[in-house]
Structures are given as structure tokens and as C-alpha cells.
Image (spheres, rainbow, N blue to C red):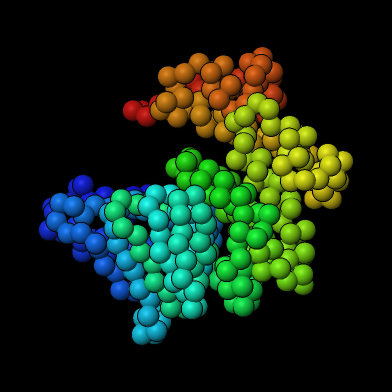
Amino acid sequence: MILLDTRELPVDERVEAFRGALLTASVPSLVRMEEGGERAFARMERWHFGELTLFTSSSSGWAVTRSPRYLRLEGAPMVSLSLQVRATGRFGQSGRQERVEPGELMLNDLTIPYDFAWSGSGGAQALQVPYDALALPPHIVRRGAERLRASPLYDLLRAHIARLQADADTLAGDPGAAALGSATLELVRALLTSAAGVDAYARPALAESLLQRVLAYARTHLTEPDLTPARIAHAHSISVRALYRLCAQAGLSLEQWIIEQRLEGARAGLVSPVGRTRTVASVARAWGFTDPSHFTRRFKAAYGVTPRRWRASQPGPAE
């Protein structure tokens, strides 16, 4: 969902529109843009995944300060795990100052003072997580924020946020969007407790979130034909046997779950505006099915009708 695109606004309204959109998406703070007039630009988007929100921004230089006086204003208690995409961010919180280079993660606790800025054309992708949903004590969150790169989950979260953003429209509209949000929330919790290095929180969080991490990884790579149990196990540094045991304890057949998720994706793809212009085999391949006949058999077994007949029975966009 697009919150703001300044290309659609008169030049003299852009700066104020930027401030308003940022405050709508975040918490009360002082917002300043580096440039005015035609040199000021911004595009902001937001998607919801259950309790979690993905917020992205691309803009000319800006700065935001949440001083103690702004803490008295109403604002949802939350944290923001942000992936810097372009430009170098300058972040200050809890007495530390750091540079956030493109490709790096930053954790901002929005319940305490901070300042952040970038110059020139920049961009970032942020997961906004309510404190209640995160269910971690503030001291664990803040300790983890200072040591994110120390966690072995750091690269996994970077890749996960980037992939979420790349397919955000499709993923946010999927029936599994809320479940994907829950799995992503578990990943954020595990990253923070792992980075904090507090065994009382880190070990249980890593163990409890392993299944969610496995399923989040599988969702991210559903369309890839080489998504196998061996690949999934390798990505999470466990054996295939341990992977099957983990799924069995949750009453889950991993292969069947992957097929079901792919079938749901293909079923939606068959009647999408773009999908209607493609062959059934092409849509099947786009969702990881390399054998069209196998896809047709599985589709009919799941839905009682062939893919071609099901698509023909669904009304088109103009109907």
C-alpha cells in the first residue's frame, strides 16, 4: 500500500506531506527534510503481516529526532528492525552513535529517544514490531540492538527482509500473510536474544523459533524447484533427520506442506491478471512444479477439478 508518492503532489506540498506520512507510519518526533522544492522527493509504502508491519521509504535526505518531550506524546510502543538499502544512515541511541551502511541492519527502540538521518538519495526497509508482540524485556532488546552483527541469524534476517519487500504485494495479499508475520516475528525475537547473548532467553528462543524459521525459509523459496529437505536442513545447520523430527513433533509433513503452499500459490496465479495470459504449464513452473502432468494430478486431487477447468470457471477481471 502506497502511503506517499511526492511525484503526485505540487512542489510546495512535498515536505509537509513527507512529515505527515512519516508520523502516520511511525511515532511522534521532529522530522526535517534536507532539501525543499523540486529537490525533495519521497515514496513510502506499507504492508501488514498480522501484528507485524513492513514499512519502506525511498527519499531525498532527511533527519528525525525523538527527544524526551516527544515521548510524552501518544505513540505505539514498538521497535523497528531496518535494512538500509541506499545511502549511509547516521543513528544515535542510548549514548552510542553508529553509521549504517547499505546492506546493514539497525534496531531502533522507538520507546526511547533517538536520532536518525541520511543525506542524498537513500532508502530503507523496516519491520515494525509492537513491544507486546515481541514479548522481550527492554534490556534484552537494547542489549541485542547493540550487538546485532554478533548473531548467526543476522544474515538470515537481512535476506528475509529483502525478500519480503521484493514480493510484498503478493505476500501481504496471501491467506498465509498473518502466519508469515508470526514466523517473521519469531525470527526477530531470536535475533535479538541471540545477539544479546543471554542464555536464559537466547537458547529457548532459538529452539522454539526453529520451526518458524524453517517454514519462513520454505515460504521464501517456494517457487524454486530445488527446494528440498536437504537444502532446508543445510540452511539451518541441522541434519535432514533432525528436520523431519522437528516437523513430526509439530504434526507436520514438510513435503506435503510445501506442495500445499505451492498449489495455493498456483491456484491464485492461474486467475491473476498476468496469470490468465500464461499457459497452465507456465504458471505451474513459476510455482516450482517442473512436471505439468504431476501438477495437474496434484491440483485435481486437492481441489477436485483440473487447473484448466478451475480457471475457466472463475470470473475474469471484467466480469
Residue in the image at 62% along x and 41% along y:
219
Residue in the image at 59% along x and 28% along y:
287
Q: Quadrant of residue 303?
A: top right
Closer to us: 258 or 10 = 10
Q: In which quarter of the image is residue 305?
A: top right
User: Is residue 24 visible in this depiction of the protein?
Assistant: no
User: Is residue 83 visible in this depiction of the protein?
Assistant: yes
Q: Quadrant of residue 12?
A: bottom left
Residue in the image at 62% along x and 54% along y:
154
Query: Quarter of the image containing the C terminus?
Result: top left
Please give left or right for residue 115 compared with residue 270 in the image: left
Q: Name the spot of residue 245 as percent of width and height, x first.
A: 86, 46
Q: Name the spot of residue 101 as percent of width and height, x first.
A: 46, 54
Closer to us: 77 or 295 = 77
Please give left or right for residue 73 compared with residue 11 in the image: right
Position of residue 139 relative to residue 257, above or below, is: below
